[in-house]
Image (cartoon, rainbow, N blue to C red):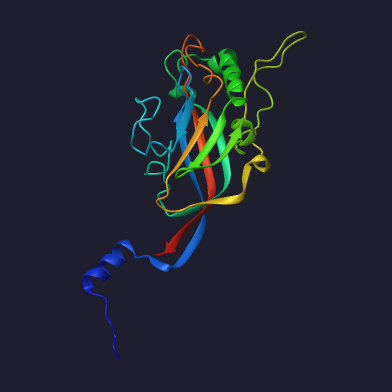
Amino acid sequence: MNIQSVPPQLAALQRKVGSADFNRWTKRRYTYFDYVQLPPAGTAEMAFFAVANGSADSYVPSIIKTDEQTNTSKVGQFDKGHFLIDNIRLHIRTFAKNRQATGINNQTSIISNQYNALQLVLAQLAIQGVFSFQVGSKELFDIPQPFLTMPPGFGLEISQHGAATGAGGSYSSWFQMDPNPIQVYRLDPVQLIEAEQTFKAKILFPNANSPALTNIVNSTTPKVEIGLLFEGLLISPVQ
């Protein structure tokens, strides 16, 4: 009987880091996400997954991307194997008050009294743009008004902002994306992105730049991030 033993050095390496069996595959639910800071002066496009974790934000270079902004280590690629996309979400995320600049973070009632201009800008942003997705050199699809078409499908549902008003009064506006998970944009058919395959994901503003945020809250520029989330099945060899 011819028995081939594994060299001790290779066996030690397998015990330490594992080994992949490319004859057997496994799948699990996974979400890739990338958040990009909205340029304060407006922009003609926003590119996602264009900067890896640990690098400077594409539009605000003073911001270094961490695990809060993206969970991929590669530019324009999914870094954990083949990925089968079935859902796409967009998320507009306003920075928490304590992470905003001075002029916002040091004001006691800034959110309830002076965020109205910001909410109006976000509402304008939500009806603009075209989402473009390209794999390799092939453009797969364009989706107009992507913030309405591809809502996040998570988050709190705000029913009232500020105190109730008296006769003849009015509420300050408050922008909110659809938190209903049923409204998430579902790809049909699903889209397979193979390991090491490159892609480009952008929101284009062909008619006019995105709305400006400069000095709209208490003469201060608020910070807002736009997130793109791809959900689906991560397909990888059995370890």
Q: As rendered, which of 88 and 206 lies closer to the eye?
A: 206
Q: Is residue 194 left or right of residue 122?
A: left
Looking at the figure, which quarter contains the C terminus?
A: bottom left
Q: Is residue 116 left or right of residue 48?
A: right
Residue 65 horizontal/vertical position (percent):
38, 34
Count up the numbered dots: 0
Look at 51% across and 12% down and name the residue there.
216
Look at 37% across and 39% down and name the residue there.
52
Residue 190 horizontal/vertical position (percent):
58, 51
Q: As rendered, which of 115 and 195 lies closer to the eye?
A: 195
Q: As rendered, which of 179 and 76 lies closer to the eye?
A: 76
Look at 48% across and 27% down and name the residue there.
45
Residue 44 horizontal/vertical position (percent):
49, 23
> Which residue appears farthest toward the right when viewing the image?
167
Looking at the figure, which quarter contains the N terminus?
A: bottom left
Residue 18 horizontal/vertical position (percent):
34, 64
Look at 57% across and 27% down and name the residue there.
129
> Which residue appears farthest toward the front when viewing the image?
137
When asked about the image quadrant of residue 117, the answer is top right
> Which residue appears farthest toward the bottom when viewing the image?
1
